[in-house]
Amino acid sequence: MKISNIFGDHELSRLDYALVRDSDVDLEAFSRQVESAVDQHGFAIIENAVPGVACDHVVSEMRAYIDATPHGLHGLGGTRRCGALVARSTTSHQMIAHPAILELAKRILGEQRLSGDAVRINGREGRGEKGFRYPWQLHLTQIIDVGPGGGSNDMPHQLKLHRANGMWMHDFQHVGIDPQIEVMWALTDFTEENGATHAVLGSHRDEPRGGVRGYGEPTVQAVMPKGSVMIWTGWSIHGAGANRSDARRVGMNINYALGFLAQEENQLLACPPHIARDLPEQMQRLMGYRQPAAALNYVAECQPPEDSVLREDFDVLVPGAHGHVMDVKFDGPGFAPADDAAFEAKLSDLERQKAAAIAADHLEQALHLKRAISILQRSPRKTKQT
């Protein structure tokens, strides 16, 4: 359906991912079509992005967390919100790392391909050139479960139509940059009656980009079947609708943002290293377990996360845990004493402390000591001269 507003003539474009899955259209060409729709209208829908059974699995995996979460968080009456999906829902990974979404994030965030945007680094300006891209990462993962009456006058939504780009405090309106893209997965059917997301088409082209004119314009609702996903920019005005049905509307909000900006949901805490180290490298990097540029995001002794916190026995409180190669002749023995008797005494003392921690049920301390023992045993030692 086409509409006209102060931003021009628009429609909520719909593209079918089945064309890619059936190999009729390649992923890059498909992503260019979605990108073009987002560029022109601020929003686009991809239908048949995942099978409906995958949506059911996500809801099932998250059910205990949803049920244990109060309604009304963030002022959304009748609504439950809960996050940390990477750690809690394995099935969500196929949506979070969906090929079409990652390709769009690369083009819109990494290459800044939307109209009026550009990558600007060290006095240069451009878009899409190899090696001249912004780093980007996962920004937010969240189930949004709206019950009957959610958003009504009895259970109002305090967070009404809004844009999302104001969270970093810096005013990006005149910078010519898209800091984030947002996506909403329909884990159940999204209908007008159950309050499908409202969108002000073209509002990403307001002047200035964070302007107020769009808030008075009519909206269209993102009616879409389960397994579909809507994509929009951080400049696009949107908001949840009121659920006038007897069933709950369940969506999954997954956002991506530039890698040098703070994440809305801290992924490194929501999915800590002891969980993240068992995930695929793509997911680790997507969450931010990497150095996106130069020294940005290093750990302790100038190490990238994959060579430090993602190692099983890494412990920031254990000297030598960094694993850097030591030259015993020049650097000394490091954490491990050179003398055999001193080495055995240190090892025995750590073992004694670990046993005491276990006996006292101080399991975190016991784990710390276990790592210390592992690091001691693999640390270089200066051999005795004979």
Image (cartoon, grey):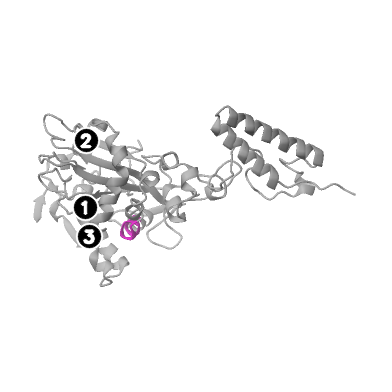
Numbered label attached to residue 48: 3
Q: Closer to the camera, 251 or 341?
A: 341
Which residue carries the number 2 mark? 79
| In magenta segment, residue 152 | no
Q: Is residue 58 above or below residue 147?
A: below
C-beta proximity under 8 Å, tags 3 and 1: no
- SS state under label 2: strand
Pointer 3 or 1: first along the chain: 1
- Residue at 46% from the left image edge and 47% from the top image edge: 276
Magenta span: chief secondary structure: helix
Magenta segment, which residues?
98-105
Q: Residue furthest top?
A: 360
Per the image, label 3 sits on a secondary structure element best described as loop
Q: State the residue at coordinates (37%, 41%).
A: 84
Amino acid type assigned to the residue bearing label 2 in the image = Thr
Residue 129 visible at all: yes
Q: Which of the 4 image quarters holds residue 64? A: top left
Secondary structure category for the residue under label 1: strand
User: Residue 100's spot in the image, x, y percent?
Assistant: 31, 60
Front residue of 244 and 209: 244
The residue singled out by tag 1 in the image is 43
How many numbered marks, from 0 up? 3
Return the disc, 2 or 1, that comes first in the chain's sequence.
1
The amino acid marked with disc number 3 is: Asn
**x 22%, y 44%: residue:** 250
Position in image of residue 122 (x %, y %): 47, 52
| Figure quadrant of the N terminus | bottom left
